[in-house]
Image: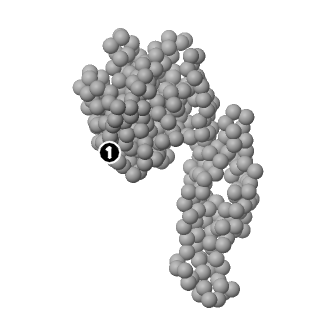
Amino acid sequence: MDLYAFTRALVDIESVTGNEERAALFVRDFLRRAGFEAELWDVEPRRPNVWAAVGRPRTVLSTHLDTVPPFFPSAEDDRCLYGRGACDAKGIVAAQVFAALRLRERGVRDFGLLFLVGEEKNSTGAQAANRRPPDAVKFLVNGEPTDSRMASAGKGTLRMDLIARGRMAHSAYPELGESAIDKLLEALRRVRTLELPRDPLLGPTTCNIGIISGGRAPNVVADQARAELLFRLVTPAAGLREQIAAAVRALAEPQFVLEIPPVRLETLAGFPVTTVAFTTDIPALAAWGRPLLFGPGSIQVAHTEREYIDKLEQARAVEAYAEIVTRLNAQN
């Protein structure tokens, strides 16, 4: 397979988070046929990470195998490859695999490949991998779509639920009940008017109200309601958690379900630099050395129905990853 055939074959394997096994087996088997010592690291039943090492890895290329739903298969034209995961991040898996082939052809050693499950949900694969880093590793090059620029910093994530409770009643007599939906709407209004933290480099904290649910029927005063929110963090989350708790007190119960801190990252001279507003597996891989973030593709088409990767950019990323490994391995 060439780069594009490999990418399309991988994209055509449905690997929505929780269903990564077939994609992991495909990558492992390809690496083995190419002469690498590749293995699976079980994370959960039928959810393995993929690991391959050449020598004693000082620099590791890493990204994730899972995708967001819904799955849709690959297609291509003269310019682009399309499909779920084309840029986030199966096209990056392919670029890193073919960079490894190129490095080996050049006689470069002491690098590794780490492909992870669960990044799109809770970094389960990264958390498991963090318990078994190679003893010589110094640098982790994480792959996400950064428009082929190196990220100097990235926002974190605070995911939370707001749960409001009320008392059911006949809607003809609302005074006999207590509407959980009314409480939730007021709690959300207060959250939306909070003055959120800012950072000179990363900019503002942002909030997305992603899901709202509640109630029983149009003619019943709602006894329960729930909203799921996600904040993109630019500072540690402790202060924001306190702000939210104070704002919604007596209206709703905040339950904080996931926290990933913002990160500052290494860069290399000669590469254009950017910052990113999304989170990655990097905070969960602290034992894998000093982190860098680089990848082909645009985050603006990731998670959309038009996801794609530019073929020329992907091919250039193969050489970029090879250069990054070579330069990092030469550092003391």
**In this view of the protein, can residue 265 be seen by the observer?**
no
Q: Position of residue 47 (x, y in %)?
A: 35, 44
Looking at the picture, does residue 127 appear above or below residue 139? below
Front one among 4 and 176: 4
Q: Position of residue 178 (x, y in %)?
A: 66, 79
Q: Residue furthest front?
A: 78
Looking at the picture, does residue 61 appear above or below residue 169? above
Front one among 95 and 258: 95
Q: Residue furthest bottom?
A: 172
Disc 1 residue crowd, few under 14, some 14–19, many 20+, Cα 10 Å: some
Residue 213 placement: quadrant:
bottom right
Q: Quadrant of the C terminus?
A: top right
User: What residue sits 72% from the left and 37% below the top?
Assistant: 199
Q: Position of residue 121 (x, y in %)?
A: 48, 48
Task: Please give left or right for residue 78 compared with residue 34 in the image.
Answer: right
Q: Quadrant of the N terminus?
A: top left
User: What residue sits 48% from the left and 19% below the top?
Assistant: 324
Task: Please give left or right for residue 254 compared with residue 73 in the image.
Answer: right
User: What residue sits 69% from the left and 47% below the top?
Assistant: 238
Q: Residue furthest left?
A: 33
Name the element at disc 1. loop
Q: Which residue is mark 1?
A: 73
**In this view of the protein, can residue 78 be seen by the observer?**
yes
Q: How many marks?
A: 1
